[in-house]
Amino acid sequence: MTNIILRGCRGKMGNVITQMVEEDENALIVAGIDVSKGRDDKYPVFYSFMQCKVPADVIIDFSSPVNVREMLDFAIMRNIGIVLCTTGFSKEDQGLIDEASKQIPILRSANMSMGVNLIFKLVEEAARVLADSGFDIEIIEKHHSKKVDAPSGTALAIADSINEALDNQYEYVYDRTDIRAPRVKNEIGISSVRGGTIVGEHEVIFAGSDEVIEIKHTAYSKAIFAKGAIQAAKFLPGKAPGMYAMNDVIG
């Protein structure tokens, strides 16, 4: 049984994770951390980590970058790992996370979906095979109208996976409006669509002479991210200090 402390337990993703863990016989949320008020909590919820005395094996963080130092200090003191699902950390925060990973295991991923992390592997292999054959590479990502950043972190992570497979020889092009020239070979085009309630869609296009190969992932609900976070939480206890990714979970 993996005992979990859930930071951000009263948020949207926190609620989804809580519901999914209830159906998982190998995981249990023993405490939550959240600054917002709530009712009918199914486990004890604390305003801060320092108020929490409940024993646990791992922390899942689906909240915000605020007070990340407190969480890291708590995890180091308890010698437990963190599944870090929060984004938007400052350079200072990232430095704290990197230092903490020398003492505890931390799993961090741009996207917690098992399917998306498989996409990372697939596009790497496709890029190695197709780039030298003259295939152009484009990424199109689609999200709901409320998403404020573009391109998505997942789209950039996909581009980075491709670029690393190609010895980082490619440049990212986000807008062709002012470009009056043919496409050059070492480009990865990244386009963003925002509209409606699209949860998330990422499509990678390898366009060659007379043929096109497409690799696509569509998210229909936030449950896929919760599922990945829970799988990661069950993976992390007992691991050596260091920085881990979802690729380590899926093998």
Image (cartoon, grey):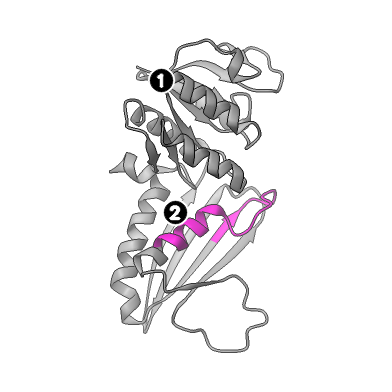
Q: Residues within 10 Å of mark 2 (few under 14, many from 20)?
A: some
Mark 1 residue element = loop
Locate residue 1 relative to residue 84 in the image: left or right.
left
Classify the position of the C terminus by image quarter. top left
The foreground one among 148 and 193 is: 148
Of marks 2 and 1, which one's residue comes earlier in the chain? Answer: 1
Name the residue nearer the viewer: 248 or 134: 248
How many angstroms separate mark 2 from mark 1 (CA)? 32 Å
Residue 56 spot, x, y in % from top left? 44, 16
In the picture, the disc for residue 57 is 1
Q: Is residue 88 visible?
A: no
Residue at image location 63% in from the left, 58% down from the top: 150
The percent position of residue 86, horizontal first and vertical second, equals: 56, 39
Q: Which residues are magenta?
A: 141-161
Residue visible at 66% across and 50% down in the picture: 147
Residue extending farthest bottom:
181
Above or below, 100 against 19 in this view is below
Q: Residue at x 59, y 24 (%)?
A: 9
Front residue of 199 and 109: 109
Report the quarter where the N terminus lies: top left
Q: Are marks 2 and 1 in contact (CB under 8 Å)?
A: no
Check residue 160 for magenta coloring: yes
Magenta run includes residue 238: no
Q: Amino acid at mark 1?
A: Asp
Q: Secondary structure at mark 2?
A: strand
Q: Which mark is residue 248?
A: none
State the image coordinates of residue 52 (x, y, percent, origin top left). 56, 13
Mark 2: amino acid? His
Circle 2 sits on which residue?
217
